[in-house]
Image: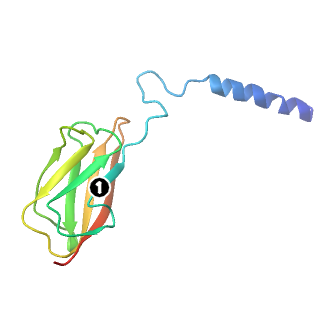
Amino acid sequence: MPRFGRLSLIPALLMLAGAVPDAQPGLPSADVAHFALESSSPAAGATVPAPAQLRLTFTQEPADGTVSIRVLEAGDAGVHALDVTQDEEDPRSFVVGFHGTFPAGTYTVSWRGMGADGHVVRDTFQFTVQAD
């Protein structure tokens, strides 16, 4: 095929590709953002006074019963925390209250959840509690 003949196929192929739908019925569309952590308080990397609670806000409301949050001190020893509760006014937000106070040090927050796309996402971040 002459060179100009192959080049003329490119626009036709691009038009055909645009005519194909991105998603099948019943499946999430390609525009659905993946479930992720939007913000936290204390924020990732922050140095703060001992917090009374931890708040995580996700990019979308997670599937029921899929969120777990753990706060770990050095050596992976868990911090004594209350149950994880979903915010009634913002179902994308979850709060963990703590018993007692935190000694100064760096803590790791480990979380997991599943969004509308069905993917389970896990991640960690750290914050530091300053000395009194």
* Quarter residue 45 falls in: bottom left
- Judging by the rendered image, the residue that carries numbered circle 1 is 40
* Front position in the image: 59 or 19: 59
Toward the right, the furthest residue is 2
Numbered circles on residues, count: 1
- Which quarter of the figure is the C terminus placed in? bottom left
User: Residue 60 location, x and y as percent?
Assistant: 33, 39
User: Residue 117 location, x and y as percent?
Assistant: 38, 36
In the drawing, does residue 26 fall left or right of residue 61? right
Crowd around label 1: few <14 · some 14–19 · many ≥20 (10 Å): some
User: Residue 34 location, x and y as percent?
Assistant: 41, 42
- Secondary structure category for the residue under label 1: strand
* Quarter residue 18 falls in: top right
In the drawing, does residue 63 fall left or right of residue 83? right
User: Residue 10 location, x and y as percent?
Assistant: 78, 31
In the drawing, does residue 123 fall left or right of residue 4? left
Residue at 36% over, 41% down: 119
Q: What is the three-letter code of the residue carrying label 1?
A: Ser
* Quarter residue 19 falls in: top right
